[in-house]
Amino acid sequence: MPYTKRLIALSAIALAACQPQPADPGGDPPDPSTYEPSTEAEKFSYAVGVDVARSLKQVADKVDPAAFSAGFSAAHGDVDLAMSDEDMTAIKTTVSQSLQQAQQAEAQEAAKEATAKGEAFREENAAKDGVMVTDSGLQYEVLEDAEGDKPSADDKVTVHYKGTLIDGTVFDSSYDRGNPATFPLSGVIPGWTEGLQLMPVGSKYRFVIPPELAYGQRGAGARIGPNETLVFEVELLSIGEPEEES
């Protein structure tokens, strides 16, 4: 949710939660380093205040606490606002757009850095004994061989796997969950669709997958950035629907 919408939603909750008047009308605000809420309303209001502040963490350098407090108090009380609704919408839009531009620039820089590091990593990995490279650029190494059947692109498979970034950071692991994954090969990233078809049941391979065969420029969630090269250790357990335990 964009920060402006999140702020509006949380502020609405805060306004509804707060009491009509503070404990000391016109007095100085409490010292946040020593303040201890005691009543239910104070505790709830304090919790909502923390939520609002945390929701604005990414724009902390653009938020003036005194001005925020003044706007909150004005909207909560019978006081004329210092800005029109149109002006407030305009400034929130301006700040939101500047944030989006900064985030895009940051993502582009991260993608550029990931591309360079990934290319160097794949070049070094491809030179290792036992590493094969397909026409698509997928790199694979046989860790444990087997003589079982190989799946086709239309099959469903069950695997154990661990996925890492090139620096070794683990972003996903069925081993850690203690539960293998079952999925159709047609529904995963291209590097997996291609790579799993090389594997006999019972084998274990290591794949180094370039970004164009993984999540590309968009990345995936908070753990996989744009243009990341991914490393997977995959153990093919079975082809088809897994057998139900009796």
Image (cartoon, grey):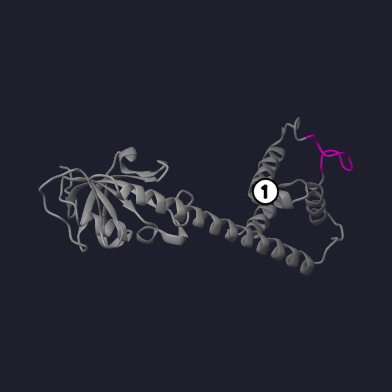
Q: Residues within 10 Å of mark 1 (few under 14, many from 20)?
A: some
Residue 246 coordinates in the image, percent (x, y): 15, 42
Residue 4 vertical position relative to residue 127 in the rendered view, above or below: below
The total of numbered circles placed on residues is: 1
Residue 76 vertical position relative to residue 37 in the rendered view, above or below: below
Going 18% across and 61% down the picture, which residue do you hit?
Answer: 152
The quarter in which the N terminus is drawn is bottom right
State the residue lying farthest toward the left. Answer: 147
Residue 162 coordinates in the image, percent (x, y): 32, 43
State the residue lying farthest toward the right. Answer: 26
Going 41% across and 50% down the picture, which residue do you hit?
Answer: 120
Going 81% across and 51% down the picture, which residue do you hit?
Answer: 67
Going 65% across and 47% down the picture, which residue do you hit?
Answer: 57
Q: For this view, does 31 lie left or right of residue 228?
A: right
Which amino acid is tagged 1? Val
Residue 29 vertical position relative to residue 109 in the rendered view, above or below: above
Instruction: Identify residue for label 1.
Output: 52
Q: For this view, does 112 lie left or right of residue 238?
A: right
Q: Please report the bounds of the magenta region as a residue range.
A: 22-31
State the residue lying farthest toward the front. Answer: 127
**Please, what secondary structure does the residue beneath circle 1 have?**
helix
Q: For this view, does 129 lie left or right of residue 16?
A: left
Main SS, magenta residues = loop
Residue 118 coordinates in the image, percent (x, y): 41, 52
Residue 182 coordinates in the image, percent (x, y): 26, 52
Q: Nearer the viewer, residue 3 or 111?
A: 111
Is residue 27 shown in magenta? yes
Quadrant hosting residue 92: bottom right
